[in-house]
Image: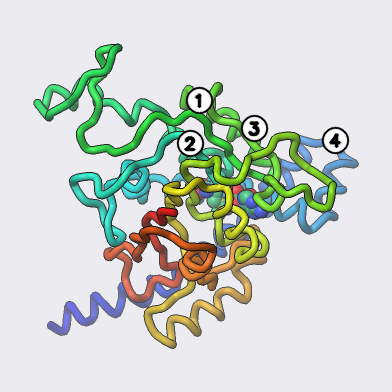
């Protein structure tokens, strides 16, 4: 009993220190970022980037995320894959689809270097040969490919990857090519705030996404970084068609107790300055709920997240 109390206290102690360790790792990327800036730009442009807080922050976050992002992808990859398959309920993975999966015209918000891009590939629609040998029930399509029985996703016809940080674009392009999505995935090099509005006649993107024309929006760890979430989430809501779905895996404001809310606020005094503008205390679920009427909402915190998690998440689907 006392050992387990000691083990739990020890775990909570280190868990509470976790965000500071994450911040420390981010700071350790500053020298590498400076080196990278001069390696990829001439001297004058390099100095201009170092003297511009916003441009340096973008370059720094870009370097840091090449380290942090893949770790998150490894740890939470199955969870997000299940989410897009339509196989989650109340924040947890379930065996049978509970609703439609991703498909049709999709907006991916803030893909960064494209860590999740391969999840949009049609290969997730079909069984691979080794899985087929297990004798699971499948349907065959015209090409003899067997559809996975445990996914409710449909064919993806278009993905708009809305990523304003240009320092991610080369890597994002490589991820798109590696996933075989060159003809499907379009990199939109602006923020969501410039997607369909004319921005006072000053349009930053040549393309246009019509209101009500989007089947799915996918946001993975990015609504913490967008400006003016209330306004821009409402604008994105307008782009979804009736019946369209918003798949979400985001970190949000702590709700566990007053002391975790307070602690999160303290960490957030420095966090956005060192993690590319990411805000810890956003009530993202509430903002999404208030963006407009939804026919169903199945969103919760994954149950395996402990109380001392200063960066709690929500996962699930909003259906318009
Ligand atoms: C924490 S990163 C997550 C990246 C990616 N989704 C992942 O999980 O690896 C947040 C991303 O949101 C992007 N972002 C910031 N402001 C944005 C905006 N206004 N519109 C769209 N994306 C934005 C950032 O450039 C960054 O790539």
Which residue has dot 4 on it?
42
Work out how far the residue at label 3 is from the one at label 1, CA to CA, in angstroms.
Answer: 15 Å
Question: What is the crowding at mark 4: few (fewer than 14 residues within 10 Å), some, or many (at least 20)?
Answer: few
At horizontal 46% and vertical 49% (from top left) the residue drawn is: 242
Which residue has dot 3 on it?
170
271 shown above or below 145: below
Q: Nearer the viewer, residue 223 or 262?
A: 223
Residue extending farthest to the top is 143
Q: Nearer the viewer, mark 3 or mark 4?
A: 3
Work out how far the residue at label 2 is from the one at label 4, CA to CA, in angstroms.
Answer: 31 Å
Which residue has dot 1 on it?
181
Q: Quadrant of residue 231?
A: bottom right
| 227 on left or right of 238 | right
Disc 3, disc 1: CB below 8 Å?
no
| 13 on left or right of 20 | left
Disc 1, disc 2: CB below 8 Å?
yes
80 shown above or below 181: below
| 43 on left or right of 53 | right
**First in sequence: mark 3 vs mark 4:** 4
């Amino acid at each position: 009993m006392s050992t387990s109390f000691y083990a739990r206290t020890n775990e909570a102690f280190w868990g509470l220190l976790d965000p500071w360790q994450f911040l420390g790792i981010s700071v350790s990327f500053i020298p590498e970022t400076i080196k990278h800036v001069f390696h990829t730009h001439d001297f004058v442009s390099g100095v201009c980037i170092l003297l511009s807080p916003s441009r340096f922050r973008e370059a720094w976050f870009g370097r840091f995320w090449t380290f942090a992002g893949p770790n998150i992808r490894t740890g939470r990859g199955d969870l997000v894959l299940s989410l897009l398959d339509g196989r989650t309920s109340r924040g947890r993975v379930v065996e049978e689809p509970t609703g439609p999966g991703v498909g049709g015209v999709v907006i991916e918000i803030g893909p960064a270097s494209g860590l999740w891009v391969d999840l949009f590939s049609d290969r997730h629609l079909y069984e691979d040969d080794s899985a087929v040998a297990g004798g699971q029930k499948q349907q065959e399509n015209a090409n003899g490919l067997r559809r996975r029985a445990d996914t409710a996703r449909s064919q993806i016809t278009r993905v708009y990857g809305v990523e304003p940080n240009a320092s991610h674009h080369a890597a994002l392009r490589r991820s798109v090519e590696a996933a075989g999505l060159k003809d499907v995935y379009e990199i939109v090099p602006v923020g969501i705030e410039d997607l369909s509005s004319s921005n006072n006649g000053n349009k930053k993107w040549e393309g246009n996404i019509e209101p009500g024309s989007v089947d799915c929006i996918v946001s993975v760890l990015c609504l913490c970084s967008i400006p003016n979430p209330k306004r821009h989430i409402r604008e994105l809501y307008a782009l979804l068609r009736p019946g369209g779905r918003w798949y979400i895996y985001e970190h949000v404001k702590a709700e566990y107790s007053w002391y975790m809310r307070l602690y999160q606020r303290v960490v957030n005094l420095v966090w956005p300055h060192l993690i590319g503008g990411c805000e810890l205390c956003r009530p993202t679920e509430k903002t999404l709920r208030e963006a407009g009427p939804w026919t169903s909402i199945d969103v919760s915190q994954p149950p395996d997240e402990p109380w001392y998690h200063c960066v709690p998440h929500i996962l699930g689907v909003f259906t318009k």
